[in-house]
Amino acid sequence: MKILFAAYDPQPERWTDLIAAQLPDAEIIVWQAGLPPTGADYALVWQPSEALFEQERSLRAVFNLGAGIDGLLRLPNLPRDIPVVRLEDAGMSVQMAEYVAYHVVGASRDMDLYRQQQAEQRWKIHRPIKRSEWPVGVLGLGHIGKRVARTLAALDYPVHGWARSEHALDGVQSHAGQAGLDTFLSATRVLINTLPLTDDTRDLIDYRLLSRLQPNAVVINVGRGEHLVDDDLIRALAEGQVTRAVLDVFRQEPLPADHPFWRTPGITITPHISARTLRDATVEQICTKIGALEAGAPVSGVVDVQRGY
Ligand code: GLV
């Protein structure tokens, strides 16, 4: 069995050694542009080039080294007749949950203010948090969205969730589809985006949507940069409808040095680190699935390429 590893990593052996340990009989090849066709059976990819699918014609499955497959769906020649499998959790949802919780707690507990007071050697106590004033709304209730919603519900924040279809989740009020979007937005002060990027969700977070949130809104984007209309966020911040935005993902990454987000008051920027792909958990998950496919068994996490996630 031949396995192709096609993801940018200056030290691909950090991956290939782990794969070899799990699948000792496999031949593991690191993809390079210009390489002759390898005849690989399986490919592990992250934002591969179109050339990969041009030349690799005997693939039996493609494994995406991340949760979001938008980087793959951009390729016109992504094979449609073999399973495309995305990463399922693999240690990502807990990281997302802690990243989001950190920012929700920080905002609702006035941590910036206390930090500022410390710098001024000032001892001043502000009124305690009223959780009813910090309702959160999670866009997207996949593995990641669910974990985020549950974590915040466990901290007693009022939590709403929105997805294409209704989801039953303890402590989370679920809203579905276009019909449910209005009630979701009007119930939400802290908007958290965990949606997959599809034609339906691109540019979803625009000025109109931001205007429908509760006053003094906070936006946390851990989905994709293309979900958010950059200028609309800047306008909503300038007008005070949104008071703070935490952005981990951007239309262009790295975020260009001249992008206005760097200088917009109220924006916190992190470089796409809210949930890192963890090598051990990822390789173990994928190798287990390769074993299942080899044995003719079904695997979970197969993407509906038409639907986009
Ligand atoms: C990262 O952004 C991922 O999709 O896993």
Image: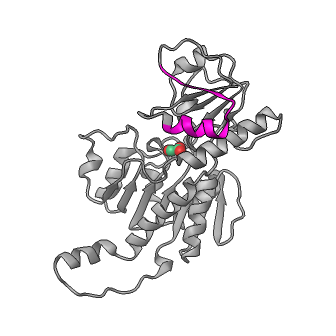
Residue at figure coordinates x 83%, y 34% from the top left: 296
Q: Nearer the viewer, residue 86 or 2?
A: 2
Q: Is residue 213 something one can see in this rendering?
A: no
Foreground residue, 284 or 307? 284
In the rendered image, residue 108, in percent from the top left (x then y), is placed at 41, 74
Asked if one can make out residue 122 in the rendered structure from this viewpoint, the answer is: yes
Q: Residue furthest left?
A: 120
Above or below for 157 versus 98: below
Left or right of 200 on screen, residue 58 = right
Choose top left, top right, bottom left or bottom right for residue 4. Answer: top right
Residue 48 position (above or below residue 260): above
Toward the right, the furthest residue is: 296
Residue 279 is situated, as x and y percent measured from the top left of the image, at 54, 45
Name the side, left or right, on which 41 lies relative to 72: right
**Range covered by the magenta-colored residues:** 14-32
Q: Is residue 92 above or below residue 76?
A: below
Give the image quarter of residue 251.
Answer: top left
> Is residue 23 rendered to the left or right of residue 140?
right
Is residue 17 inside the magenta stretch?
A: yes
